[in-house]
Image (spheres, coloured by chain):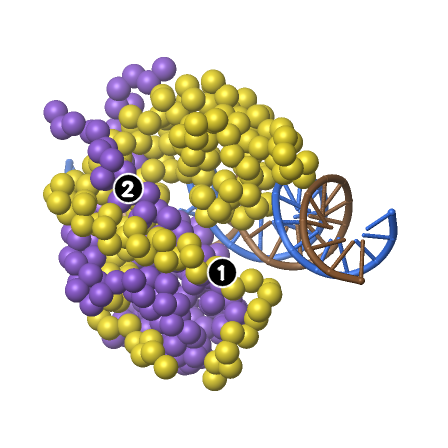
Chain colours: A purple, B yellow, C blue, D brown
Amino acid sequence: MPEHHVDPVQLGAYFALIEVSGLLRHAIEQQLREAGDLTFVQFQVLMRLGQSPTGSHRMTDLADAVVYSRSGLTYQAGRLEEAGLITRSPSPDDERSTTATITDAGRALIARVLPGHEEVVSGMLFEPLSQDDARTLARLLTPVRDHMRSTPPRSATSRRRRGGS
Amino acid sequence: MPEHHVDPVQLGAYFALIEVSGLLRHAIEQQLREAGDLTFVQFQVLMRLGQSPTGSHRMTDLADAVVYSRSGLTYQAGRLEEAGLITRSPSPDDERSTTATITDAGRALIARVLPGHEEVVSGMLFEPLSQDDARTLARLLTPVRDHMRSTPPRSATSRRRRGGS
DNA sequence: TCTACTTGCTTCGAATTCGAAGCAGGTCTA
DNA sequence: TAGACCTGCTTCGAATTCGAAGCAAGTAGA
């Protein structure tokens, strides 16, 4: 059985990670709100769509990609559609699936907001990091991401891992 | 003017960071809910208080520490107080300031929840990382955290820092 | 001391969030 | 084709979130 103790070094890394992501997110939200009245999630969704060759994705895939609940994404998609930044239509191959597609207005907004976004990320996250540090950070975090992605979130199945109370 | 371009390597690190923190947070929230009916913020607050020599902190300091809005912290403190996990009292030295203090029940809850918490952090975040990797991660993120902390979030004051466009 | 400004917390209103439940559409097997 | 189960999205209700506004206490300068 593995020792699940978290040593001081790990604890430091863990805390720093949480704090950094929180502070970064906060700064980003503020910049996006001022620049284009966008939420971070909305921005992420538009980015993902914009990077897709077809400009579209299934709702579920989007939710997974940006780490968001399905119902939450439905809500945000509604807002984005109202704003004319995306469109939603039933997928051609699977009738129950909805495909979200970025509009020209959506691409335009991204283009308008992106420079300021990069400025924040650059100034807050990478200011104290060398080019090499950035490479190392990516090298460390990418496998972690993949590991987390591959480990399915224990759902309603297999409840009760060991009598609690 | 500095080049605010975010190169592909940085972009990868940035995305991985956001994803990792999101997935981790999600897993943690789930574990905490099952184990002790706690929010991540609540858990963090209790942890900070528990680690303090006096078992207490000012509200504002707590809010800053866990990266949360003041009003949000007021709400959460209310919940924690209701649950008997903390107490609130006016600070002795500054009448307008409120000091939150962890109770024995709060400490007991932390003790009950912590093992499972460490298990999640261990299993999700540090599984793919060597001891050395963890050290490196901490070495990279700590300066970033300090940098972010030292750079005050541009508030309503001092808007327009220097003509942008 | 008085007046302006700052600081610390709470209240308020409006928007967002999530899980559970609901509802089509799909898939598998006999 | 029917019956049982799975998938994908949306609706629903309740809880949470945040910024703005409000209010009390502290501070500095005349």
Spot occupied by residue A142 in the image (x, y as percentages of width and height): 19, 55
Q: Look at mark 2 in the image and give the residue it sits on.
A: A12
Q: At x 15% / y 47%, what residue is drawn?
A: B133
Q: Answer whether residue A78 is visible to the viewer in this image.
A: no
Q: Look at mark 1 in the image and give the residue it sits on.
A: B153
Task: Relative to A162, say whether D14 is above or below.
Answer: below
Q: Quadrant of residue B74?
A: top right
Disc 2: host chain: A
Q: Considering the numbered disc 2 on the image, is that residue within a helix, a strand or a loop? A: helix
Location of the C terminus of chain A by quadrant is top left
Q: At x 53% / y 27%, what residue is drawn?
A: B101
What amino acid is found at the position of numbered circle 2 in the picture? Gly
Location of the N terminus of chain A by quadrant is top left
> In front here: B31 or A17?
A17
Task: Relative to A127, say whether B140 is above or below.
Answer: above
Residue B66: give its label: none
Q: Quadrant of residue B83?
A: top right
Same chain? Circles 2 and 1 = no
Side of B135 relative to A85 (left or right): left
Q: Considering the numbered disc 1 on the image, is that residue within a helix, a strand or a loop? A: loop
